Image (spheres, grey):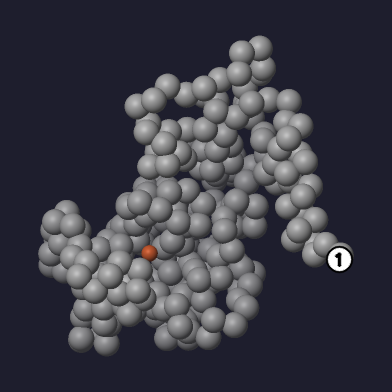
Amino acid sequence: MTMSSLERAEAAEHALSQELDRQVVKSAIYTSGERDPRKPTVRQPGKLVMMGDDPRLPRMPERPTLFDFYRLRFAPANHMLQSAKLALKNGVDEKIVLACLLHDISIAGFIRSDHGYWAAQLLAPYVDEEVSWGIRYHQALRFFADESVGYEYPELYVTLFGADYTPEPYIQEAYRYARAHKWYMTSRLITVNDLYSFDPNAQVSLEEFTDIVGRHFKQPKEGLGFDASPSAHMWRTIIWPTKYL
Ligand SMILES: [Fe+2]
């Protein structure tokens, strides 16, 4: 039986992880839930710990751009690309197309829990405040229908969370706050274009959004992670997720 390229890549990765000359001690957030974070971490004495580039991950350029993160660190971003494409088709403002392209980056490359808030914080120094605001609140708005724009509670959420799921009080509170805000529709439009059923086979390329990103995302010349912005450390953690300190 011949190996597929995916199997070969996985085998190579496995071999590489077996011979890592530095040990990786995972951050609490990567194992919490699977193991009790109150237990002490185990470290092999006499072996160096991981610092800097982890050889199991593709190497990032010195001054990484947003697209470098999409290509080298984020899970396949087809969902976000399709949302942005749909937004483009629907003729919304370019800022909203950008918001759709970015809205789930935390799920794709960082942390799932409270992903809207994490994404907003990652992006705040680089986008219009309205864009990061919209991304922050899309997480809550996704749980609440708005008939005026034809947005219904997602069927997918019934499958994912069960029919009896009710959003936590802080999400309900965030929804009420956003509903009354002047930027409500920006955030709402992210949810309107946030469809999983929009032609799942359509392949959308990142390059289709080069111009919109160029116009509305303030790419730092030092590279994301190295510009000393309030979220630079978060981008660095995505570059070096296994760094010991
Ligand atoms: Fe989302």
Q: Nearer the viewer, residue 207 or 212?
A: 207
Q: Is residue 158 above or below residue 238?
A: below
| Residue 184 seen anywhere in this rendered image of the structure | no
Q: Nearer the viewer, residue 113 or 208?
A: 113
Picture quarter containing residue 39? top left
Q: Residue at x 70, y 41 (%)?
A: 56
**For ligand 1, which image quadrant applies?**
bottom left
Q: Is residue 155 above or below residue 23?
A: below
Secondary structure at badge 1 equals: loop
Dot 1, how many residues are within 10 Å of its Cα: few (below 14), some (14-19), or many (20+)?
few
Look at the image and tell me in which quarter the N terminus lies.
Answer: bottom right
Q: Residue at x 64, y 57 (%)?
A: 71
Residue 60 position, x and y percent, is 67, 44
Picture quarter containing residue 224? top right
Q: Return the residue found at the far front.
A: 1
| Residue 15 seen anywhere in this rendered image of the structure | yes
The disc labelled 1 sits on which kind of residue? Met
Q: Is residue 223 above or below residue 45?
A: below
Residue 48 position, x and y percent, is 66, 18
Residue named by callout 1: 1
